[in-house]
Amino acid sequence: MSQSYDRGLVEDFGRWREFKAGMWAWIFHKFTGWVLVGYLFTHIAVLSTALQSPDAYTTTIQSLESLLVVRILEVGLLAVAVFHILNGVRLLFVDLGLGLESQDKSFYASLLLTGAIVVASVPTFLAGVFG
Amino acid sequence: MAERYSSFERGGRRWLWQRLTAAFLVAVLAFHFFLLHFVNHADEVTFGMSQARMQEFTYFSLMILFLLTATFHGVNGVYNALVNQGLSGTQETAVKAVLVVASAVLIVQGVRTALAWAGGVPI
């Protein structure tokens, strides 16, 4: 028999103090999704300089990569992408009905693993920008 | 009677496609980041290096599929998020039209760029 469940208005972010792990996972997944789709459009726009000339493309990319702020934004992009990937895998398992009892633990694991991968990647992402 | 809390219409296939593209993107996005930041370094990028990769049919077709799936997954995600926030009626129809046009522009521009690198379809 089906039962009704009053979840409350999840779109009301004023309730954030009441949010549990699943709600934070939902918010973070949505936030990282918005960032990634915004970046997708920006990425194609920047890559489109290849349509102008090979030199225009190479100069544009190398100029951007010489800026520290761009490298820092790339680390941010990595953090956003890694979390979205790991939490996305978690969601696929949830959709399949696997690990439903440990949804909160798998969310915390996604956060920790994201942090570890991002910290470990910082040297690679900042290589060469200081001279 | 249970209420139904879903952004997806009953019997629709977008729910399934969002999951199928997700599974594909998990692997390809990780590969993309790894190849272009760890194997090749961002500050060493040149048109010639991108061209060499794009002239391989396997890489070219993977990137086209990446563009198509990422555009669908991203734009469909935006649409679902807006419906989730209460978008409906005429506004929903208008937003849907804008998103479809934006997706088409993105895909056309991405394919044109890929073809510029590869110098045509690399077959």
Image: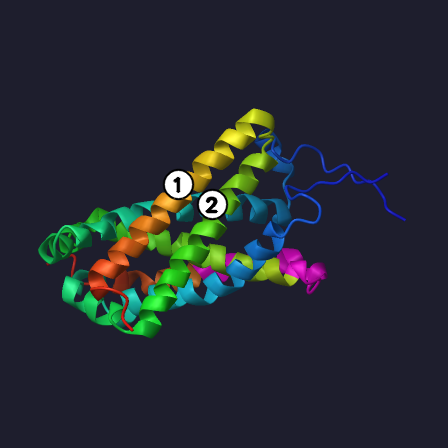
State which chain disc 2 sits on. B
Residue drawn at the location 49% of the way across and 32% of the way down: B95
For the C terminus of chain A, give its image quadrant: bottom left
Residue drawn at the location 47% of the way across and 51% of the way down: B72
Q: Position of residue B58 (x, y in %)?
A: 34, 74
Does B76 lie within the magenta span?
A: no
Query: Could you say whether the residue bearing mark 1 is in a helix, strand or loop?
Result: helix
User: Range of the magenta residues?
Assistant: A94-114
Q: Position of residue A57 (x, y in %)?
A: 15, 54
Q: Position of residue B61 (x, y in %)?
A: 36, 67
Dot label at residue A123: none
Query: Could you say whether the residue bearing mark 2 is in a helix, strand or loop?
Result: helix
Comparing A126 with B83, the one in front is B83
Residue position marked by numbered label 1 in the rendering: B102
Residue drawn at the location 36% of the way across and 52% of the way down: A77
Counting residues from the start of the chain, the first of labels 1 and 2 encountered is 2
Q: Toward which corner of the image does residue B104 lie, by quadrant?
A: top left
Q: Nearer the viewer, mark 1 or mark 2?
A: 1
Q: Residues within 10 Å of mark 1 (few under 14, many from 20)?
A: some
Dot label at residue B75: 2
Q: Answer with left or right where residue B16 lies relative to residue B104.
A: right
Res. A107 visible in picture: no
Comparing B119 with A87, the one in front is B119
Res. A70 visible in picture: yes
Q: Residues within 10 Å of mark 2 (few under 14, many from 20)?
A: many
Does A100 lie within the magenta span?
A: yes
Please name the amino acid that badge 1 sits on. Ala
Q: Main secondary structure of the magenta part?
A: helix
Q: Are marks 1 and 2 in contact (CB under 8 Å)?
A: yes
The vertical placement of A118 against A36, above or below, is below
Q: Position of residue A4 (x, y in %)?
A: 82, 40
Please name the amino acid that badge 2 sits on. Val
